[in-house]
Image (tube, grey):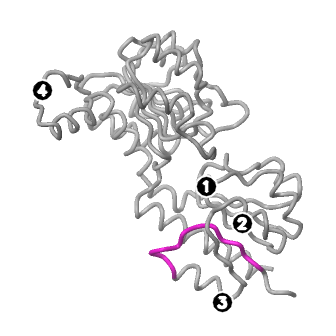
């Protein structure tokens, strides 16, 4: 059998041993995560190790005549045209069901509260004011979290971690999930009740055709005027036009997002929510850094490199 060829677009700085080990049983070529480069050479490879920097879409898949497996060190796969990939008989490995490793990752839930606290307490504005030799304490007045209601949409792994953090702040926890879940951390409610009663709402749901636009204008209209919405899952869970309208109309107090829908576009600053965030202080957007801790980045990449190694050894 010919030696398996692996095209890698993932940065293994800090965990080089994993890619070196893989190189002992396969021909591994590492390139920068650039769409044009991958499109040019993908047809020569059997396995693709995918970064999140651009969409692995139909055009690239059609070029990948020899591809057998795509591997992504992430729980979300909206950077891959999953349906089309599988229809072509190409396997996909991702982290969504790899509980052995992801149960130790708390980074995304921690970021959710970082965003919440920043929007609520106006941290960025306060820091910038001190840099300008200003000391306007009361202009940055926010709300304490004690006794506030924290609404979780999706009471899975990250939802449960978030619930524990919320309880640490002395918050009341309510949650919504498609499954019936009994938890001593809070009470399960329907989505409408969650929107009405929550002071803060955090999304921890996988993006599917059913969950796209899960939160829209109808839900924003149910929320409290001082509600803050946090999304560290996937952007398309929220109807972005409806979110923007709700912020402009002051239907809610603010939002903290770890991504935008279309984060692969080159000029992201033209995105309507990005434009709004530049001119307004009640929307914070981070560049999809939910899983960006040393523990989760290295842990995920090492784990998935081993998955590729085991896959090749099994052939």
Circle number at residue 243 = none
| Residue wearing tag 2 | 37
The earlier-in-sequence mark between 4 and 2 is: 2
The earlier-in-sequence mark between 2 and 1 is: 2
Binning the other alpha carbons within 10 Å of mark 1 as few (below 14), some (14 to 19) or many (20 upward) gives many
| Residue wearing tag 3 | 24
The earlier-in-sequence mark between 4 and 3 is: 3
| Residue wearing tag 4 | 137
Q: Nearer the viewer, mark 2 or mark 1?
A: 2
Residue 77 in the image, given as x and y percentages of width and height: 66, 50
Q: Quadrant of residue 239?
A: top right
The earlier-in-sequence mark between 3 and 1 is: 3
The earlier-in-sequence mark between 4 and 1 is: 1
| Residue wearing tag 1 | 52
Q: Quadrant of residue 131?
A: top left
Q: Secondary structure at mark 4?
A: helix
Q: Nearer the viewer, mark 4 or mark 2?
A: 2
Q: Nearer the viewer, mark 3 or mark 1?
A: 1
Residue drawn at the location 61% of the way across and 73% of the way down: 305
Q: Secondary structure at mark 2?
A: helix
Q: Which residues are magenta?
A: 5-16
83 left or right, relative to 275: right
Residue 92 in the image, given as x and y percentages of width and height: 74, 59
């Amino acid at each position: 059998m010919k030696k398996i060829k692996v095209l890698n677009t993932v940065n293994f700085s800090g965990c080089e041993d994993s890619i070196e080990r893989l190189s002992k049983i396969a021909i591994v070529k590492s390139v920068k995560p650039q769409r044009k480069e991958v499109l040019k050479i993908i047809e020569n490879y059997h396995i693709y190790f995918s970064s999140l920097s651009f969409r692995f879409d139909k055009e690239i898949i059609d070029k990948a005549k020899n591809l057998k497996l795509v591997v992504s060190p992430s729980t979300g796969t909206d950077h891959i045209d999953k349906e089309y990939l599988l229809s072509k008989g190409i396997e996909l490995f991702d982290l969504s069901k790899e509980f052995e490793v992801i149960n130790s990752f708390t980074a995304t839930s921690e970021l959710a509260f970082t965003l919440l606290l920043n929007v609520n307490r106006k941290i960025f504005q306060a820091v910038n004011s001190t840099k300008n030799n200003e000391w306007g304490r009361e202009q940055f007045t926010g709300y304490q979290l004690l006794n506030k209601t924290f609404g979780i949409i999706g009471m899975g792994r990250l939802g449960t971690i978030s619930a524990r953090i919320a309880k640490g702040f002395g918050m009341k926890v309510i949650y919504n999930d498609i499954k019936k879940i009994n938890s001593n951390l809070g009470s399960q409610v329907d989505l409408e009740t969650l929107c009405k009663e929550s002071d803060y709402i955090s999304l921890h749901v996988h993006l599917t055709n059913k969950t796209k636009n899960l939160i829209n204008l109808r839900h924003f209209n149910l929320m409290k005027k001082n509600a803050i919405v946090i999304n560290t899952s996937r952007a398309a869970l929220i109807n972005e036009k409806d979110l923007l309208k709700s912020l402009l109309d002051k239907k809610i107090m603010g939002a903290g997002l770890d991504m935008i829908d279309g984060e692969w576009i080159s000029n992201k600053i033209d995105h309507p929510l990005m434009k709004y965030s530049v001119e307004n202080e009640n929307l914070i957007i981070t560049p999809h850094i939910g899983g960006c801790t040393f523990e989760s980045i290295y842990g995920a990449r090492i784990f998935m490199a081993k998955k590729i190694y085991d896959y090749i050894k099994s052939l």
